[in-house]
Image: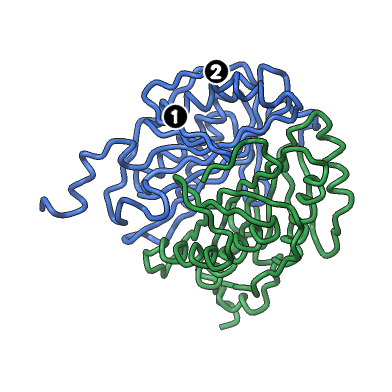
Chain colours: A green, B blue
Amino acid sequence: MTTNALDLSPALSPVDYGVGARFTLSVYDSDYVRIILDALANANRDELTIETNDISTFVGGTEARVLAFLRDVIAAAAASGAHLSAAILLSRGCPGELACALPAGVDALGAEPVVLAPTGVRARAHWSLYPLLDGGSTGDHMSPIYAAIEEAKAAGVYAGSDHFATRLDGDLADVLATAANGWIAVGGVVQHVTTHLTVSLNSPSPITE
Amino acid sequence: MTTNALDLSPALSPVDYGVGARFTLSVYDSDYVRIILDALANANRDELTIETNDISTFVGGTEARVLAFLRDVIAAAAASGAHLSAAILLSRGCPGELACALPAGVDALGAEPVVLAPTGVRARAHWSLYPLLDGGSTGDHMSPIYAAIEEAKAAGVYAGSDHFATRLDGDLADVLATAANGWIAVGGVVQHVTTHLTVSLNSPSPITE
């Protein structure tokens, strides 16, 4: 059995398993360079791999560290008072770049739910969760999505649904944790799972219910 | 056979099939309200359903009309000279909101590739394509993704790959058409397919190759 790809799973670290985020922080303010650089400079980077390029920033590490970093950077930028949006992608189970460095069929690797201390910053988000089923699937990718939405309701941040996305509204930490924990929960049974959030903060627009 | 859900497929319009986009246009400029409203005001809305709320804008219609609208709005905002990013989600095969209004197992509904006239505006993007396989899947969701990446190379806009995303670089119209046509092609064989792009324009950051 030692040559079977399935045997790799017990030894996989979150980084080996491709746990990480890619995000773009947009600041609707002419002083955006300073606001973004200050927010990035003050966030704790311990145990994280961070690579920023001209489009977005990659953050690799454990679920708890990646989410704490996202919370801290976005909350710090929000403290400027500027209107912000953050486009966030979380991925697991498909490390590498052009091709997955893990074959399909590796045991799904879940994780403990993340717990994030509140920020005092209100965030509203559109959230989509994508279980990318591999061989052995039951063919039912919607049930884990509905279960995650029920969890969002239990967490008090579910705020309705729009086309293609679920609306979340609450403390930035609760919004991020809800999306992350849906992704982690599905990740316990499906290898390759991604989730996308567009988070809006300090918006001058009236809230749409 | 008239009560079989599969029989619905031949009569499905793009709107019935859930063809549409959700996007957030972020303008890194203190004059963002005017720039966004001007860009939206001047775009052709014929044959489209458009709903804007505090987080993002939904656009429903045929693939060709939805993509032309996205191109026109983003290009118009870019003409301001401000740095922009656009977070774009395209979806097909799962209309409705909280739940798919179409059951799994409906015949996949493809479309002709979109052709978009060039804008003269350079765009760089991170692109991810998600075939959400339903019953009857082969369990191989990566092959159609690799095929779409080969098409991006043939179109001359492939610019490498980063974690979780393929990098595109070219005229905004070509970047959007490449992502849309990957999504349409996979949509010909998989019912529920989404794709996400984060597009950056007028960035002052050096290009990362």
The amino acid marked with disc number 1 is: Val
**Residue neighbourhood size for the residue with mark 2, other residues' Cα within 10 Å, grouped as few (<14), some (14–19), many (≥20):** some
Which amino acid type is marked by label 2?
Pro
The disc placed on residue B172 is: none
Q: Position of residue A83 (x, y in %)?
A: 72, 38
Residue B182 in sight here: yes
Residue A122 placement (x, y as % from top left): 69, 51
When the figure is inspected, residue A157 is found, relative to residue B174, above or below; the finding is below
> In what quadrant of the picture does the N terminus of chain A appear?
bottom right
> Image point 36% across, 24% down: which residue?
B47
Chain of the residue under label 2: B
* Residue B209 at least partly seen: no
Q: Which residue is mark 2?
A: B118
Q: Nearer the viewer, residue B143 or A126?
A: A126
1 or 2: mark nearer the eye: 1
Mark 2 or mark 1, which is nearer the start of the sequence? 1
Can you tell which quarter of the image residue B203 is in?
top right
Check the residue under mark 1 and report the chain it is in.
Answer: B
Position of residue A62 measured from the top left corner of the image (x, y, whole percent):
72, 67
Q: Which residue is mark 1?
A: B66
Residue depicted at 55% across the width and 61% down the height: A193
Q: Is residue B2 left or right of residue A14?
A: left
C-alpha separation, residue under disc 1 versus residue under disc 2 = 16 Å
> SS at mark 1?
helix
